């Protein structure tokens, strides 16, 4: 279940929309927020994938 929770962290489109609204006049902060959101999404996806791969290997 732990790995599936990390795979749920991939859903980042709403976070990007909220960042656009929060930093409406600050384009540099919008860029930083988008980079942070995309990096966190990438980390969540990779970590969830490798965690599930590790757990599945232990079950065999």
Image (cartoon, rainbow, N blue to C red):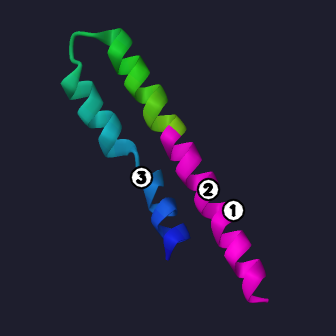
Residue 51: x and y in percent read 65, 66
Residue contact between numbered discs 3 and 1, judged by CB atoms under 8 Å? no
Residue position for label 1: 50
Whole-percent x and y of residue 21? 20, 27
In the structure shown, which secondary structural element does the residue marked by tag 2 occupy?
Answer: helix
Please name the residue shown 48% across and 52% down the image. Answer: 10
Q: Quadrant of the C terminus?
A: bottom right
Is 46 above or below relative to 60?
Answer: above
Q: Residues within 10 Å of mark 1 (few under 14, many from 20)?
A: few
Specify whether residue 19 is painted magenta. Answer: no
Which numbered circle lies on residue 47? 2
Percent position of residue 5, x then y: 46, 66
Dot 3: what SS? loop
Q: Which residue is mark 3?
A: 11
The tag earlier along the polypeptide, 3 or 2, is 3
- Crowd around label 2: few <14 · some 14–19 · many ≥20 (10 Å): some
Count the numbered circles shown.
Answer: 3
Crowd tier of the residue under label 3, counting other residues whose Cα lies within 10 Å: few below 14, some 14–19, many 20 or above: few
Residue segment shown in magenta: 40-60
Q: Earlier in the sequence, mark 3 or mark 1?
A: 3
Q: Looking at the image, is 55 positioned above or below residue 39? A: below
Left or right: 14 as drawn, with respect to 39: left
């Amino acid at each position: 279940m732990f790995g599936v929770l990390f795979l749920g962290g991939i859903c980042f489109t709403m976070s990007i929309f909220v960042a656009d609204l929060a930093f409406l006049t600050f384009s540099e902060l919008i860029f930083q927020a988008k980079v942070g959101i995309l990096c966190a999404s990438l980390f969540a996806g990779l970590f969830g994938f490798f965690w599930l791969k590790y757990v599945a290997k232990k079950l065999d």
